[in-house]
Structures are given as C-alpha cells and as structure tokens.
Amino acid sequence: MIYVKNLHKSYGKLEVLKGIDCHIKEKEVVVVIGPSGSGKSTFLRCLNKLEEPTSGEIIIDGIPLNSEINVNAIRREVGMVFQRFNLFPHMTAIQNVVLAPEIVRKTNKAEAEKVGLELLAKVGLSDKAGEYPDRLSGGQQQRVAIARALAMKPKIMLFDETTSALDPEMVGEVLAVMKDLAREGMTMVAVTHEMGFAREVGDRVIFMDEGIIMEEGVPSEVFANPKNPRTQAFLSKIL
Amino acid sequence: MDMNWKAALDSIPILNKAALLTLELTAGAVAIGVVIGLIMALARLSRTKIARAAAIGYIDFFRGTPLLVQIFLVYFLVPRILHWETLPDDYQYFAGVLAMGLNSGAYIAEIFRAGIQSIDRGQTEAARSLGMTQSQAMRYVILPQAFKRVIPPLGNEFIALLKDSSLLSIIAIQELFYSGKIIAGRTFQPIPMYITVALYYLLMTQLISRWVTYMERRLGKNDLR
C-alpha cells in the first residue's frame, strides 16, 4: 500500500530525514514513536506531500508521488488528522465534513450530507452536527476532524499526534474512535505518544530517532525487549 | 468678516445632492478597488514570479505616488489609450472613479494580503490534505475567514477614500467639496460653508464607521480565533 525508499528531507542544512525505507501493507496499523525532533511528523507529512521530500521515492497505492496532478489524486485517498485539529472555524461540524466530498469528489449535496451525518454518528457526535468548532471541546473537535477525513473515503489514514493537544480526560474518546477504525481494517499510520494505543491496536511499531528508523517490530516485542539502546533509553523514559 | 449662516443653510439641498454624489463616487471606487485588490493580493501571493512582480509594481506605484497626480494621469491617459477624439459627456466621473478605484486597489491588495496571511497554515494544510487544489482551498477555506478579518481595515480604507474623493473637485466633478467651494465663493461666506461641508463629511464617515462595526460583529460571531 505504501512503499517508501531512501526518503530524505532537509530544511536548508538541517537534515531531518536521513534515508527512510519502509513498506506498509494494506490494513496494517503502524505506530510511529520517537523523541521530539526525530523526524516522525516530517515522515508522516511526506506521505501526503505536505512536505516535499528532498530525495527518495514514495509510492502510494501503486502511484508514485511526484507530479502535482498525482498529488491531489493521492491526497483524496490519504486522510490526515492533525495535532491541532485544523477544523474550518467558519463552518459547522457537518459543513466541515461535507465540504471536500462536495467540491473534490463532486458528491451531490444530499448524499454527502447523509454520509456526513453517518460519520458524525460514528464518532459519537450526531447531536453536534450544527455546532461551530469553537462551541466544541478539543476532543469533540478532533473527532469531527476524523469524520471529515473519513468523508473522503480514504484508503489510508495518517494521524499526526492527534491526542497531544488534548486535555487528558479527552484523550480516551479520540483513541476509542481510532481503535474502532483500526479494527474495521483501515490502513493507518499514527505518530503518537500513546503507548497503550500502540500496544492494543498496532500491528507494528516503528521507533525513529535522528531521522532514521532505529528499530521496528511487533509492539509487544519492541516494548518488552527493545534491542536498540536508543529505543531502550526512550522507552525507559516514557513507560 | 461677518459670518452669515443663511447662505450655508440655503445651500443644504445642493449639498445633499453633492454628498450623495460623493457617496456614489466612493462606492464605485470601492467596488473597483475590492476587485483589483483581491486580484493583486492573490497575484502578490502567487507562486508565479511574473504575477508577483506585476502586483508589487502595481502596489508600489499607486501607493507611492500622490492620488492627485494619479487622477490627472488617468484623466489624460484614458482618452489617449482608447484613441478618443472627443471626450464623452460626463467623462470626468468615469475617470475620477477609475483613478480612485485603481488607487484604492493597491491599498486593498495589501489589506487582503495581510488577511490571507493571518490565517493559520494548518487551515491550508487541512484543506490540501483533503484533496482540494490550492485555489479550492483559497476559495472555500482561506478567503471566507480572511474576509471577516479584513472588515475593520477595509472600513478604514472606505473612510479614507470618502475623504479623498474631495480631490476629484480638481477635474470639475461637482461632489461635496467642489459644491461647497463654489457656494463659498459666490456668497463670500467661506467659514460657515466649509464648516458645513466638514460636518457633512463627518456625518458620512461616522455612518460608515458604525456600519463597519455592525458588520464586524455580525460576521465575527462564529470566529473566536
């Protein structure tokens, strides 16, 4: 589903990604962990070309990510949820959800609305469809953001520290939605600090540091027996 | 000099008409200015170098030269460019509104640019990540938010333009200041006349300012950021 070959990314002289290779299969749930500044968010943002790779190759669903035309086609298939929600503040929850299907997929209004309401129900926010984002809690906003990404019927979902900006009591409701998605067989790449989530639904955990993948494997193994000293040091700090 | 307010009071019907013309000229200029301003702001932020350079040149020229000079330039240039042998009736209104519109377009471009740039990058990223093109993101996500934010500076520009429209008296447009000047000269009562004219401008700028505040409150209620 996702092939990444020798991916490099530099900002001027600062090299953030120093050669990432990885292959993510359909329906796989991959959790990316690592200290801040390790390049994990940059890696994720390269996967839908919010960041332009300096060199290397990314192939998503058989399509190489290179020209601008491909980029919009790829982005339709790759949903992304951000740390800071990024809901459109001038639109209600349901308007946030139906906008892209209507203007990008050209879905008719009634159909988009129907699917949108179903998605809001799925994330437990049926009663908030008509609310503007500033009237919603952080957890609710993030769930709307997930519904908005799902409305494009993506094949892959990227989660960029989706619970890091939330008050602790709201983390659970967002993780619950993500877990449901994982169980339904969505292909997911999640950058997160939620080790419980990684252990419970992750098929694979990738530990990144200094712009490379230091270690990867089945979560239970990596968490119990980290082989790389960096992984050991990182895990000992957060577990 | 003996001050006599009778002349000023007698001229109120004429001044009302002239004030209405001032408002119409300003509205016309604002309409042109908003359209040009939006185009120039988008060009200014475009990835195309030529578009950016053209916008910068336009903005620098119209902000860096006096409006009075621009009025004359437009007044004399347009017939030359269009190869008009004789000027159409009421040509000065056309030239005046055009000159003011071109001028305000430069200021409004900078207002729009600031508004667009004030919208969080995450908004564009969210829109693009949903598969929207750059222009779709601009149209559906960025501009609606930016418009709300630029209402106050746009209102200020509207007010500045209304006051600057008095410069159009120089090409014999009979707006408020022109009419006041004529009557002041004819009645030998400049002080009451110009005070009255000033009050007319003050009333109009106050009304615009109130209207802007109202619009700002009405449109801003869903945007706490």
Image (spheres, coloured by chain):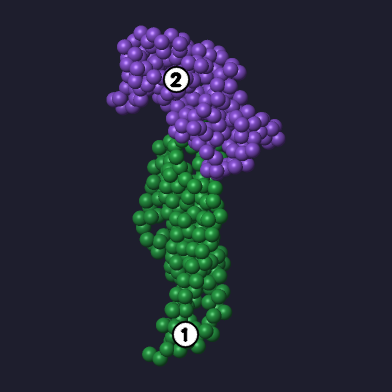
Chain colours: A purple, B green
Q: Chain of mark 1?
A: B
- Amino acid type at circle 2 is Met
Horizontal and vertical percent position of residue B13:
57, 79
Do circles 2 and 1 both sit on a common chain? no
Q: Chain of mark 2?
A: A
Q: Is residue B149 above or below residue B22?
A: above
Q: Is residue A76 visible?
A: no
The disc label shown at residue A195, or none: 2
Q: State the CA–CA distance, disc 2 to disc 1.
A: 87 Å
Under circle 1, the secondary element is helix
Q: Residue shown at 36%/58% (left/top)?
A: B65
Under circle 2, the secondary element is helix
Give the quarter of the image for residue A235. Answer: top left
Horizontal and vertical percent position of residue A84:
46, 34
Judged from this view, the residue extending furthest toward the bottom is B2
Q: Is residue B156 visible?
A: yes
Horizontal and vertical percent position of residue B62:
40, 55
Q: Residue shown at 34%/20% (left/top)?
A: A237
Horizontal and vertical percent position of residue B17:
56, 74
Q: Residue shown at 61%/31% (left/top)?
A: A124
Q: Residue shown at 40%/64% (left/top)?
A: B68
Q: Residues within 10 Å of mark 1 (few under 14, many from 20)?
A: few
Q: Is residue B123 above or below residue B225?
A: above
Q: Residues within 10 Å of mark 2 (few under 14, many from 20)?
A: some
Mark 1 lies on residue:
B186
Judged from this view, the residue extending furthest toward the right is A110
- Amino acid type at circle 1 is Arg
Judging depth in this view, the residue of A139 and B210 nearest the camera is A139
